[in-house]
Image: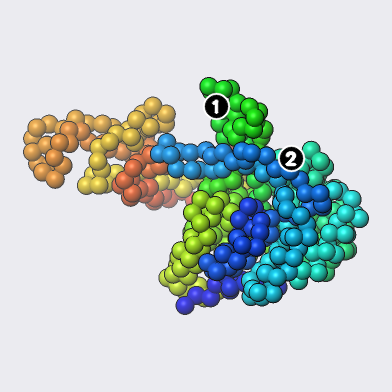
Amino acid sequence: MADLTSNFLGIRSPNPFWLASAPPTDKAVNVYRAFEAGWGGVVWKTLGEDPAPVNVSSRYSAHRDIHGNVMGINNIELITDRPLAVNLAEIKQIKIDWPDRALIVSLMVPCEEESWKRILRQVEDTGCDGVELNFGCPHGMPERGMGAAVGQVPEYIEMVTRWCKENTKLPVIVKLTPNITNVVIPATAALSGGADAVSLINTINSITGVDLDNMVGYPSVGGKATSGGYCGSAVKPIALNMVAQIGRNQQTSTIPISAIGGIGNWKDAAEFISLGAGNVQVCTAAMLNGFKIVEDMIDGLSRWMDSKGYRTLDEFKGAALPNQTDWKYLDLNYKTIASIDQDACIQCGRCFAACEDTSHQAISMTPLSKNDMAETTLKVGIERQFDVIDEECVGCNLCQIVCPVDQCITMVEQKTDKPYQNWTQHPNNPMREC
């Protein structure tokens, strides 16, 4: 049986699934329920100085797919609006009651060393396992000189991180904002400031939609709207990319990563770990489905690890990173073409429409004769057939993506005598390496 025990910065938890700093970790009753359900740890919803901020109503809006499923949530909620003393007392008691679970406290205070020193002293007294510096909140707090206002300025990241490292013995995790151009820059700043780890991504600036009857964005607060923070399954590709960027970069490759962003099942978690994450944090999936989803996450990851022969998380941590490269080093002579399984094809024509209208006209549509239809006894009512035109197919994968039948269209590698050649070696590249 695979061992899912996580050891992140010396902080042990029975599994790598932590709840991220968010509404699910705002109070003791939530956290008790989470631990009872099986979560390995939590990052307590961000604490700040008293008086606590005032939140608004409404706070959330959703972006849905054409079937109505939630792809992402936009929120304009701020840090905890509960008194600091109440939060600290609850954190202290929970750590006593659940000593085997990870309990990290997220923090955000004004960009003044004394403010950080004061709250760090109070948080240390709770017996928590570490702190996470919230440098990513994209709404509300930046106007007050906190959150993304710090996370978007590398000099501030380094400065505040150094203050915290000088004023606490607890592990310091820096939470990074995705609302930047190059995530390696703030990660490098965090490392320069002495950060023990980074967590990413925080939420992405967003407007999920507009009420066209009242001409106001969602969520609406008294007829007005503001940009919020986007999270959920739709942000996973962005988060995977940023985690990989930090893992691949020579300057930041050694810093431990706690991955956040669109994680909703065991496979998502395994993908982040394969790109170098030490553990994962979950928020939106728990908000949409409840805390018990962790049971499937634990079971699924354990079974997959068993099937692959991985005994511990470390055995596949970062395993996908060596296969990440820059575009210029991809093999220009590698080729695949699409292949359609006619027995599985339902003749919906989506592959044909996509390729014919928007790609390379590499799929033909042939009406079937009555004789053909008579011979095709298993395809009652089928009057056409779609075939790949091999010489026109560039292997772009679009037909496979739009096909509604799993494994009906596959991409088949074409053997070639041409040697590996990347763009740096290609004669059309005027800057090619000699």
Residue 141, which numbered label? Answer: none
Q: With 110 as the anchor, is 371 left or right in this view?
A: left
| Image coloring type | rainbow
Along the line of sight, the residue nearer the viewer: 290 or 357: 290
Is any part of residue 373 visible from this angle?
Answer: yes
Where, by quadrant of the figure, is residue 204 drawn?
top right
Ranked by sequence position, the earlier of labels 1 and 2 is: 2
Identify the residue at horizontal 69%, vertical 55% (top origin). Answer: 45
What residue is pinned by disc 1? 211
Above or below, comparing residue 342 to residue 282 in the picture: above
Q: Is residue 325 visible?
A: no
Q: Amino acid at mark 2?
A: Gly
Image coordinates for residue 178, horizontal then vertical, percent: 68, 45
Residue at 85%, 64% (x, y): give it.
Answer: 121
Q: How many marks?
A: 2
Task: Look at the numbered disc 2 and give the secondary structure of its residue.
Answer: loop
Crowding near the residue tagged with mark 2, few <14, some 14–19, many ≥20 C-alpha atoms within 10 Å: many
Residue at the spot of label 2 = 140
Q: Residue at x 60, y 35 (%)?
A: 219
Q: Residue at image x 37%, y 32%?
A: 355
Where residue 53 sits, quadrant-wise, is top right
| Residue lying at the far bottom of the rendered structure | 1
Q: 127 or 409: which is nearer to us? A: 127
Asked which secondary structure carries label 1, the reply is: strand
Q: Which amino acid type is shown beneath numbered disc 1?
A: Asp
Mark 1–mark 2 distance (CA, rounded to whole Å):
22 Å
Q: Which image quadrant for residue 18?
A: bottom right
> Where is residue 317 drawn, in percent x and y?
59, 66
Task: Answer left or right for 5 relative to 114.
Answer: left
